[in-house]
Image: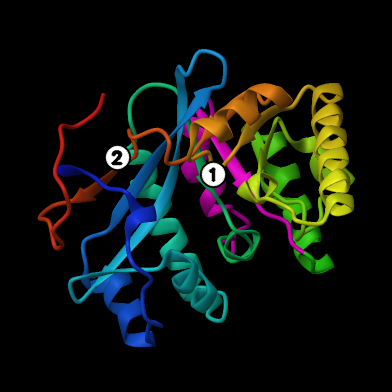
Amino acid sequence: MNAITERCDLAARPPQAQIQGTDILTALIGEVPAVEYQPIKATRTLRTVGHEALSRFWAHGRALPPDQVFAALHDNPLLFHYAELKWKRLQIELAPREGRLFVNLDPHAWLHGWDSDGKDSYLELFAPHAGRLVVEVIENLHLSDVARAERLSGAFKAAGIPIALDDVSCNKGIVSLASLMDAQYMKFDRGWLSGESDAARSDSRQALLEYALGLSRRLALTTVLEGVETEEHLALAHHYGFDCVQGFLFKEQFIRRVGERRSRLAGGPEPT
């Protein structure tokens, strides 16, 4: 495919209006797909060790907020599976050639990727790239979702594909012991970087972070701090001993799209 690479700073974009169902259909079927790649860097050396692939959507000449798209897709499981599998193929095909490639996989979409003959569509797609892929799995407060995530983690671990627990947070979601045992990476949500006006809660937050990092080390998990946007954030990552960092402090994030451009973004040279 003919991939066009574009650089952008998504954090600087103004908030988007609520999207409509027709916008989602246009983005999934009528528009050119796009993938953003964010670098993941070793904290001490700032060497790029891999990239996280993120789905990006456009409709009628404007970017759609990914969180709104995915929230709507959760209400339509088959369309969710269609979108997830379509974008996963692109994320692998258009990815930078070097380093690990981190891809998100929602357990809801994964469960709808099973064929009638028992084949797992996602596992078949990922298996040829097992040497470089890391599958990111999110758990949340609903116990059924935890169970789905555990099944997903176990299946991919058995196939030799590393698992990352994504968005480990100080104020939302839960992490099951089974998923911890399956994981090789733990990605900490940017919420750990938020200030806390209440001193007692701030102390509790720090104690929880130190405990989670200590547990990660005991389990030999590679830790990644997301949402690093300032030198102060990077200094905190050094202080707490995170293995890797990710965020808008590092300007190498870029978008690759298939075919002709449908929206205007700042252009840039294609990375290796």
Q: Is residue 45 above or below residue 141?
A: above
Mark sitting on residue 227: 1
Q: Secondary structure at mark 2?
A: loop
Quarter of the image holding residue 7?
Answer: top left
Residue 106, how many percent across, how many down? 60, 58
Residue at 47%, 19% (x, y): give it.
Answer: 46
Whether residue 122 appears in magenta in the rendering, the answer is yes
Quarter of the image holding residue 64?
Answer: bottom left
Which of these two is toward me, 243 or 3?
Answer: 243
Mark 1 is surrounded, within 10 Å at the Cα level, by few (under 14), some (14 to 19) or many (20 or more) other residues, namely some
Residue at 74%, 62% (x, y): give it.
Answer: 140
Residue at 22%, 50% (x, y): give it.
Answer: 257
**Residue 160 visible within the image:** no
- The span shown in magenta is 114-140
Q: Earlier in the sequence, mark 1 or mark 2?
A: 2
Q: Which residue is mark 2?
A: 94
Mark sitting on residue 172: none
Residue 153, how many percent across, how many down? 72, 45
